[in-house]
Each structure stands twice: as structure tokens, then as C-alpha cells.
Amino acid sequence: MRVLLTSAGLETEKIKEYFIKMSEKDMLDVKALFIPTAAIDPGAIAVLPKCMNDLLRCGIQDKNIKVFDLYTGINLDELLKYDVVYICGGDTNYLLERVNATGFGMTLMEYIKANGMVIGVSAGSLIFANNLPDNLGLIDTKLEVHCPEGEKSGKLKYPLKDNLRLTNTSALAMWGFPDGLEVI
């Protein structure tokens, strides 16, 4: 399991470096699936270039990034062609509705179980937590993003507490389970 749940993406050098380490691959060879589906309002749309820049700043080549909006699903064989799935923020309810309606949620969870890597940003993180009904159920806790104060950095014990808070400069890293839970 290689999942990085964030409020604001690869906002700090430490989060960026953690992502690069998690990828276990030369960034020039990384293929990314970029999902902007949640960005349906002007504020979220305005942040999309910053999200794309997260991947480019890590050294992922533009030609290796595919933008995929969830109007249809994608099968596991196709999804496994990508080294990372980057799920942008915006409207969490809309994103979760599209994830479930297209069957992408089930495929994405299979991808994660097959050691696929996922970066969630804001709404892209919340779909994995128990904030909403019919969530993807990756973590059995409520997740809050964009908090002025968040969890202390360091390893977490499983089971997680009922509510985890992330600032814009922190992330919940899941690299191995249950021992690989960490706030960075």
C-alpha cells in the first residue's frame, strides 16, 4: 500500500521527497494518471495548474501524465499501467458520486491492494475516509483537511483515532499496513 493523503498536494519539500521515495522508481519513467474530476467550481479549477505542477516539479515528464475525468470507468489492467494516480481536490460529494457511479472506486482499491500509488488532495483524500457514506473505506476515521492545526508528525498506531486533522503542509502517509502509517 502506497497512499499519500494531503490537504494541498506536494506542498512541502518533505512531502515531495517522501512521494519520490515512495514511488521507488526514477521520476523520468513514472507514468501518472491525473484526475481533476472534483474541480467543478472556479476556486478548485484555479488550483489545477498547481496540482499538475506538483507532478512536474518531481521530475515526471509531461508526456507521461494522462488527464482522466471520471465520465467512464477504467479497468484494473489499464490502471496498472500507471505508477501513480493523483486525485485533485474540489467538491468531495461530486467526486465520490463519480467514483462510485463509474466503478472507479472498486478498481482504485484493487490498484492500491496491488501496490499502486495514490496521492489524494483535499477532496481526493476525503473519499478514502469515513466522512461521507459510500466512501472508499481505506481508513476508518474522519479526516479533516486544511486545518490551522493538525496532527503531530510521526508514526501512528492502528486503529486510528476517530478524527485526524491535516494542515496544508502535512500528509498522512500509508506505506505498508498497519505499521507504515505516518503523519509527515
Image: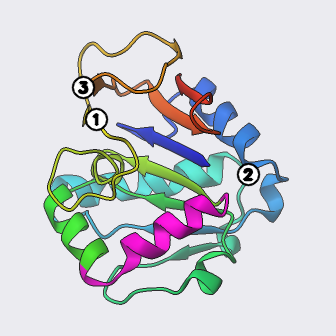
At label 3, which amino acid type do we have? Asn
Relative depth, front residue between 128 and 10 = 128
State the CA–CA distance, disc 1 to disc 3: 6 Å
The answer to which of marks 1 and 2 sits earlier in the sequence is 2
17 vs 93, left or right, is: right
At label 1, which amino acid type do we have? Thr
Query: Mark 2: which secondary structure?
Result: loop
Q: Is residue 158 magenta?
A: no
Q: Residues within 10 Å of mark 1 (few under 14, many from 20)?
A: some
Q: Position of residue 53 (x, y in %)?
A: 53, 52
Query: Mark 1: which secondary structure?
Result: loop
| Residue at the spot 30% in from the left edge and 25% down from the top edge | 164
The answer to which of marks 2 and 3 sits earlier in the sequence is 2
| Span colored in magenta | 101-115
Q: Quadrant of residue 46?
A: bottom left
Residue under pointer 1: 141
| Residue at the spot 40% in from the left edge and 27% down from the top edge | 159
Q: Main secondary structure of the magenta part?
A: helix
Residue under pointer 3: 163
Residue 59: image tag: 2
The answer to which of marks 1 and 3 sits earlier in the sequence is 1
